[in-house]
Amino acid sequence: MTVTGSVAGLANTTTINLTVIAVQNPLPSVWSDGDIGSVGVAGSASYANNIFTVAGAGQGTFSTTADSFHFVYQPLSGDGSIVARLLSLQGSSTAQAGVMIRETLNAGASHVFLFDYSASSFATERTSAGASSSYQSFASIPALPYWLKLVRSGNVFTMSGSSDGVNWVPLGSQTVTLAQNVYIGLAVSNRPTAVATAAFDSVSVSSAAAPAPVISSVSATTGSIGSQVLISGTGFGASQGASEVLLNDVAVTINSWSATSVSITIPTGATSGPLLVSVAPNMNDSNVVRFTVTAQPLPVPWLDQDVGAVRLLGSGTFANNTFTVGGSGQGTFSTTADGFHFVYQPLAGNGTIVARVLSLQGSNSAQVGVMIRETLNAGASNIFLCDFAASSFATERTSTGASSSYQSFASIPALPYWLKLVRGGNVFTLSGSTDGVNWVPLGSQTVSMAQNAYIGLAVTSGSTSSSATATFDNVSFTTP
């Protein structure tokens, strides 16, 4: 390509070698890509079926004044965030793959980069242009896929990770002074003489000027093939166009579409996984909801999800008047952040839940029972009446983020065993029974809780490395 510039009768001509290639799966609009710095081997990027495939070489961003990697990016003005799930990473043990915000596309630009490196979460940052970058090491990443989130608020950058895209673990924060207008996106590096290839999905970029779509609720979190689900939220767009709803990266059948509501049908061949709305033309993804495709879905209006960091995903199904609930996580004893699986529905004001625990399979540290909690956050105020080590226990958190406490009641001679939890204002009354007719008062607890809360069945193994499974029947939820 020849470029000629002229001014005041003077002209200068230069020739640039430009390679034009046919891209089979081009990036969605707004996204661009290119190599940053001296990479040795050219990188590439493509998009298909909600997956960004990014190949990059270069020495990366560790302890250097000049980065080198491949960058898939779009402009960001002011505050904003990026979320992406790293599906896979193929390359050497020194490969880096993650989410980045940087001031310019120059190799020495100020930046913050949150990434997977050698099966652990790391961040590098350069606090001023041309300075040497520094780094922080966070937690190990047990296995891919894994979600990464990077949020800019002024000059403060907050980083989080997640195994399910729903429950986020804070990793750290860093202060880096950047200009108002920056670049945000996906970055991959390996070594200067070879490329690493990473696959990302659930990619969402949000800012005040262009907020990402948000799912606020779903009518079901479990369903069989052919069942219909209503997704409610914001930012879906007035009409569908090229937008999609994806379940485990496969498009589902759309029945109706509006800016705040989408009705879908679970198609033949669908599999359990993240459910999200991807809005054209940028194919910007919403937050995810875990959806289970099963022949034994929960009855409406029951929903389910993991609460807190569980590592092993839980489950909830219903058949023959019996709820089967599987869950992992550290549980609710003496912690500021619970970890368990919850089958629940909303509770407005006072209410009562009764359930018979039929069976429990798991370690001696498993907990199974009935719960009322203020929110679905791990640190929410709650009370949990449960079977633990063949005895009835209650754990409670009396204020958000506080450490939970517990009470031990009577031994449970054998399963099945009935549990009852009653809310009357901020007073919670607990009872147990061997026959569901004659109830033994176990105690009461005062927990300040908002009017609107959640009520349901909770199961945890007491460990993030194993699961417990419980069955319940005679489950009833009543309000005054």
Image (cartoon, rainbow, N blue to C red):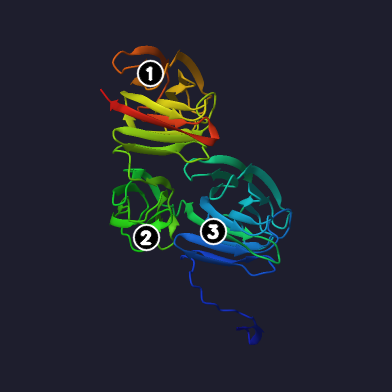
Q: Name the residue under label 1.
A: 428
Q: Name the residue under label 3.
A: 199
Residue 345 seen in the current view: no
Q: Residue 448, relative to residue 201: is it above or below?
A: above
Image quadrant assignment for residue 257: bottom left
Q: Quadrant of the N terminus?
A: bottom right
Query: Horizontal and vertical percent for residue 387?
Result: 44, 22
Residue located farthest toward the left when viewing the structure as drawn: 480
Query: Horizontal and vertical percent for residue 300?
Result: 28, 39
Task: Give the spatial CA distance, label 2 vs label 3.
Answer: 21 Å
Q: Residue 82, relative to residue 298: is it above or below?
A: below
Q: How would you rate the neighbour count of disc 3 (Cα within 10 Å): few for under 14, some for 14-19, many for 20 or more?
A: many
Image quadrant assignment for residue 220: top left
Q: Which of 174 and 318 is in front in this view?
A: 318
- Secondary structure of the residue carrying tag 1 is strand
Q: Mark 2 points at which residue?
A: 243
- Secondary structure of the residue carrying tag 2 is loop
Relative to residue 231, is residue 52 drawn left or right?
Answer: right
Task: Give the spatial CA distance, label 2 vs label 1.
Answer: 46 Å
Relative to residue 28, is residue 195 drawn left or right?
Answer: right
Query: Horizontal and vertical percent for residue 119?
Result: 63, 49
Which of the two discs, 2 and 1, labels the residue nearer the N terminus? 2
